[in-house]
Amino acid sequence: MGLRSRQTFLQGALILVISSIFVKIFGAVFKIPLVRLIEEDGIGFFNTAYTLYAFFVLAARGISVAVSKMVAESNTLGNARESNRILKISLVILGSIGVVGTGFLYFYAEGFAALLKNPNASASIKAIAPSVMFVALVSAFRGYFQGQQNMYPTAFSEVIESFGKLVFGIALAWLFIGESVEKAATGAVFGVTTSTFLSLVFIVLFFAITKRERSISIVGRLRSRREIAKELVVIAFPITIGVAVSSLTNVVDMMTITRRLQDITQVTPEFMEKYKSLINAESFSGAIDSDLANKLYGLYSGYALQMFNLPLTMIVALATSVLPAISGALAKHDMNMVDKTVKSVIKTTILFSLPASVGLAVLAEPVLLLILNSSLAANLLSVVCVAIVFVSLVQVTNAILQAYGKMTVPVVNMVIGGAVKVVCNYALIANPALNIDGAPIGTIACYFVITVLNFIHIKRVCGVKFGVLDLAVKPILASAGMGAVVYYAMVWFGNIGLGLKAGVLPAIVVGVAVYVVLAFALGAVREVDILMLPGGRAIAYKLKRMKLLRS
């Protein structure tokens, strides 16, 4: 399978998963020393800038998704020249969005920082501003290649971006740490800007090198630029709002967490004991000030959410790959393939996200100690891990609904979920007994509501029937069994003197093995699921001979 060939949706997802593993490794190698270098204060500045940047980038992703969908439909019908025209128009639109976003962040950096009650973050916001333009342009090319069901350009550009962030971000943070934490955080942020520029250079060169080899055939009518631009906007607008609302949940956290924490005028003794390492006992009045609120926000966003996002790599890959696959099948009216793809992607999502949620919740403390050398956010991580399943299902169900052309449904559902999160954050975080622990509860409630609403609409739109036993009960039983074994394995490793750090990796290996055995023993994985994988027939044949697979 060459770099320029198209893939099935699971092959494409596998390519993105492999690249995402490298991205996560580079990201961890970047974030771990960065956290230790600039600590909670610096991470608070870094995440403030990065969250604003991510809001603009994810908002622009709507056009990238629209490009992917439209290119997939044009390619399926054999009209390659129209696909190229779609790319050109998307570059104009996304380029304009990028310029506006960059200017907005740069010239209003002080205003954003003041609004968020984090005035020292303004330099970091300015440093990240050019990234908006670079990523907007990259998104157009990624959407184009994804629509062709060629995930290699996306995969390689993401790896280059992640590696560049590691090299330049750490180097610049280290260079400026002697001057101040604010300058070190700004240097780390500028490393992100440099990496996005390198990613853009790569994907433009890839497009130029492969341009001659792509067909320019026309089957049917070649639509005008105006028609294509209109359809792009019609498809992208609701997706953009939906993605923006999705990223808005991070902005909601950023704005409500620090504000509501500062409404606590007297913390509890339990809070004092738990977060004593963050508090200057001699000058502490009992109220949470902006400095302590920023540290708690950095603890949640830079530690708990950093680990929380690790298992979502595969799900993002599935969602990215499944949209053009379903769009292409719908363009050919191949409803049998559509039905199989929808069932496969949802079941794969559950089979992966449930054990990840349970395992990370059980191993929260040792995982944080091993990777970030601090278990202060262990309780936050254990609670927010419940949302992994719901966030994963929202990712893939959004992609399915978008492939069906139901662009506004995910938007409405995300708005409802976002409203739930605002209410939960406002009600829970200012409660002295909960404080920062209220943030993960709001995340769980938000994505649970969206998941339920999405499934209701998928059943109406697709007419796909899901078996509750295979889809939920069996994976839950396998995950629960795995979680129990992992818990007692950690206890046993502790009793023989391995300790939390040394015991976590063998515990993960034990957990994976137990889950695989239980999943096959309970019949959670069936032959039809294996056949959807690359080389599925050979794998299914071997598993059947081993009596591990049911038809």
Image: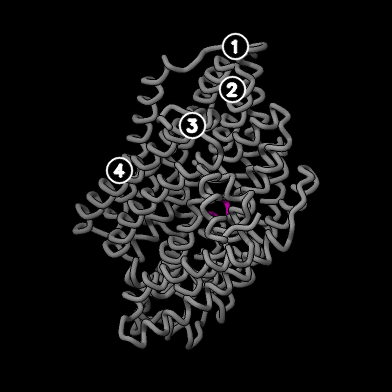
For the residue carrying disc 2, how many other residues have a C-alpha within 10 Å: few (<14), some (14-19), or many (20+)? many
**Marker disc for residue 218:** 1
Q: CA distance from mark 3 to mark 4?
A: 23 Å
Q: CA distance from mark 1 to mark 4?
A: 39 Å
- Label 3: state its secondary structure: loop
Q: CA distance from mark 1 to mark 3?
A: 20 Å
Question: x, y percentage for residue 277?
Answer: 35, 79
Q: Is residue 97 visible?
A: no
The answer to whether marks 1 and 4 mark residues whose Cβ atoms lie closer than 8 Å is: no
Which residue is denoted by mark 4 in the rendering?
A: 164
Q: Is residue 219 toward the left or the right of residue 356 in the image?
A: right
Q: CA distance from mark 2 to mark 1?
A: 10 Å
- Label 2: state its secondary structure: helix
- Name the N-terminal-most of marks 1 and 4: 4
Q: Which residues are magenta?
A: 247-251
Q: CA distance from mark 3 to mark 2?
A: 12 Å
Quarter of the image containing the C terminus?
Answer: bottom right
Which residue is denoted by mark 3 in the rendering?
A: 150
Placement of 281 over or under 92, stated as above or below: below
Question: x, y percentage for residue 240?
Answer: 60, 39
Which residue is denoted by mark 2 in the rendering?
A: 75
Q: Nearer the viewer, residue 248 or 208?
A: 208
**Tag 3: residue type?**
Asn
- As for residue 395 lying within the magenta part, the answer is no
- Name the N-terminal-most of marks 2 and 1: 2
The answer to whether marks 1 and 3 mark residues whose Cβ atoms lie closer than 8 Å is: no
Name which residue lies at 59% across and 67% down.
521
